[in-house]
Amino acid sequence: MPRNKPTLKPAARPAPPLSAASAFEQAWSKARPPQGTPAEPPPTVSARWVLIAGSIAVVGAGLCAWLTLCLLFWQGSWQLLYHPASAIARTPASVGVAFEPVAFATTEPGEPRLKGWWIPAASNATYSRFTVLYLHGQTGNLSDTVDALAALHTLGVNVLAFDYRAYGQSQFAHPSEASLRQDADWALAYLTGTRHLSAGSIIVDGEALGANLALEVAAAHPELAGVVLESPLHSPADAIFRDPRAHLVPARLLVSDRYDADKAAAALRIPSLWLATPPAPHAMASSANPAGYDRVGGSKMLVWVALNAQPERSDAFRRWLDELPGR
C-alpha cells in the first residue's frame, strides 16, 4: 500500500513586537483591578499621630530655645556683677605719689597676667613695716582707686594695688569669684616670693566687692597680719540672681559665684577692721552690722563712716594699726 505522506504544517510566524503604547496598556490592564472590584482608598494619617508629632516638634523647639537661653545666660551673667574698664585714666603720679608699675603671674610663654602699681612707703614712715594689698571693687579699674591709694600712702604703709584679669591692663578673662580669688593669691605670692616680704607684715584691704574678696582671702591665710573691709556688699551675687532673666533659667546651677560672707567670717582668725557705710536715715531702725561681722570670733573693730569721709576712714585705720601687733 502506498504510504501516506505527512502533511507539513506551515511554520508559525513570530508575533509582531509590541509597540510602547501596547506594552503600557497590557501592564496597565494587569495592574488595574478587575472590573467591578472597588479601588483601594489611599492611605490616611491618623489625626492623633499628627497631633503627637506636632506636640513633639513644638516641645523640641521650645527646649532648644530654652537651652540656648541657658547658654547665653551662663556666658554673659558675669556682666551683671562685674563692670570692668580697660582704659587707665589716672595713676598715682596724678596726685604726686611716686609708684612703680609691676607685672606678675606670668604664663608659660612669659606673658604677665596681672599688672598693677607698687607704692613704697617713705623710709621714715610710721607704719612702713606693713604692706597693704589693695583689692578694688567690681567697677572700673585702678584709675578709680588713686585717691584711696594716696590716702594709704599718706598713712605710711607700703601698697600693692593691681587690676584683676579683665580689668585695666591685666590679661582679659571673664571675671568670677574663682578667678578673683586666684588673682589675689597670685598677688600674695608676688609679695612673699618676689618682694620677699613676710606674710605677717601683709594686710589685705578691700573695697566694695573687693572687701568681700578680702574676707575670703584673709580667712584662707591665717598667717597674714590683718584685713580691712571697706563697705563690703551685703549679697553681691543678688545682682545676678535677682535679674529678671535669671528667673527663666536655673541661675543658681549656672553661676557658681556666692561670696558667702558668713562662711568666710566664721573661718577668720586674724584681726579685722570693718569700715561700714551708715544706712540711709529712713533705714536706721532696721540697720544691722555688715554681713559676716557677727560671725567673726577673733579680734575685730567696726567703724561706721561715710564713703567720702576720707579723714575719718584714715583715722580709724590708724587707730586699728596702733593696736595691731607687728608679726
Image (tube, helix red, strand yellow):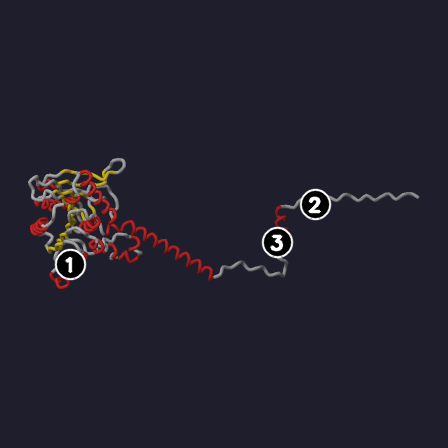
Secondary structure of residue under mark 2: loop
Residue 152 place in picture, x, y as percent: 10, 45
Q: Which sits in the foreground, 289 or 257?
A: 289
Secondary structure of residue under mark 3: helix
Q: Is residue 19 visible?
A: yes
Callout 2 amino acid: Ala
Q: CA distance from mark 2 to mark 1?
A: 113 Å
- 1 or 3: tag closer to the N-terminus: 3
Quarter of the figure with residue 278:
bottom left
Q: Is residue 25 above or below residue 115?
A: below
Callout 3 amino acid: Ala
Q: Residue at x 17, y 39 (%)?
A: 196
Q: Residue at x 71, y 44 (%)?
A: 14
Callout 1 amino acid: Asn
Residue 30 numbered mark, or none: none
Q: Quadrant of the C terminus?
A: top left
Q: Is residue 166 visible?
A: no
Residue 143 place in picture, x, y as percent: 15, 44
Q: CA distance from mark 1 to mark 3?
A: 93 Å
Residue under pointer 3: 31
Q: Which sits in the foreground, 34 or 307?
A: 307
Q: Is residue 144 above or below residue 247?
A: above
Residue under pointer 2: 15
Quarter of the figure with residue 115:
top left
- 2 or 3: tag closer to the N-terminus: 2
Residue under pointer 1: 289
Residue furthest to the right in view is 1
